Amino acid sequence: MRLGFQLVAVIAAAMTTGKPYAQRVDDYPSRAVRVIVPFSPGGPPDVIGRPLLQKLSEAFNQPFVFDNRPGASGSLGTDIVAKSPRDGYTLLYTTGSHNTNSLLIRKLPYDGRRDFAPISQITLSYGQVLVAHPSVPAKTLPELIALARARPGALHFGTAGVGNITHVGIEMLMAAATIKLIHVPYKGAGLAQNDLLGGHIELMFPSISQIGPSLQAKRVRAIALGGPVRAPVLPDVPTFAELGYPQVDTPGWQAVWAPAGTPRERIVRLNTEIVRVLKLPDMRTRIEESGLRPIGSTPEEFTAFIERDYAFFEKAIRAAKIEPQ
């Protein structure tokens, strides 16, 4: 009798959708997939995310649409995904600010871990790089710290918003070096970089992938790197740890998520294809030339990484005495 009821349910589902029951999962994706990036165009996710989605579009023969939705330090676009249907047709491509937002924004409209299903970590950085406009007379970290102490509140740093790694990293530096810099938050790292290049702000703590071309063109000057080792693409830039400030550690990452409750089969299918794409020589070259390391983790590996990263920033933010807003 139970089998009969199950069969009736399957047939009813097929009649309702107008196609066989199995196709609802097995044919995924059967239409365009919207991938929300909660930052302004021109930021670090664009550098890797756009070519990644192009290759996914080719692999699945369906458009994977890169949709920038900036605002509120990335929380506006993230909230759209949290409240989207759990069918795999709306995904989130974001950065380490996903964790720091949970720690620094008091009234997030979503839970950063509970409301999302990890698909795969895409990259891991060598750390953010502190850069200065050429008008800043300091050329080294000790010189910059001395300048900031001599002129407290005179230097301005731009960020992609409160809670973003571009913000947290400089807060770490201010706490470690006992200096005062003025925070100027923007709606995205690209907008902050534009003002840095224009000389409207003096400092920024962006990713290597974002600032690399401007460094090569000598439009900005690299001061120090917030990671455990020097980056291969910036071999002459010392780490904060080398310079006596190991507290300034800014591991950055990019990753893809789905709303929690998305069918496991779809999560696995996306993960399998993402991992394959990240192993392609041209993708690996693009990522490495951007000063990043390709990852391509399983959902389980990514979940474990998220917990470690959250714990790291929870401790770092408490040590730096950064108050949630």
Image: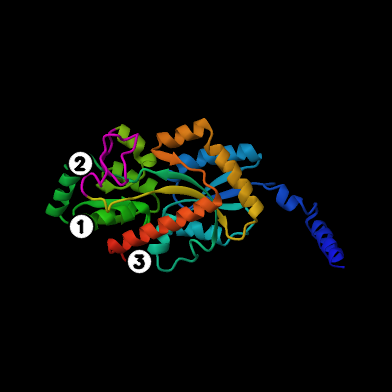
Q: Position of residue 42 (x, y in %)?
A: 42, 43
Q: Which residue is mark 2?
A: 135
Q: Nearer the viewer, mark 2 or mark 3?
A: 3
Residue 216, given in percent of the width and then of the height, sits at: 31, 32
Which residue corresponds to the image point at 50% horizontal and 56% vertical from the top-left? 77
Nearer mark to the viewer, of 2 and 1: 1
Q: Is residue 130 left or right of residue 286?
A: left
Which residue position holds label 1? 180
Q: Amino acid at mark 3?
A: Pro
Q: Residues within 10 Å of mark 2 (few under 14, many from 20)?
A: few
Main secondary structure along the magenta-highlighted residues: loop
Q: Which range of residues does the magenta coloring cover?
A: 218-244
- The CA distance from mark 2 to mark 3 is 33 Å
Density class for disc 3 (Cα within 10 Å; few <14, some 14-19, many ≥20) is some
Q: Residue at x 30, y 41 (%)?
A: 197
In which quadrant of the rendered image does the N terminus lie?
A: bottom right
Task: Provide the secondary structure element on which disc 1 rests.
Answer: loop
Residue type at mark 1 is Lys
Residue under label 3, please give it: 324
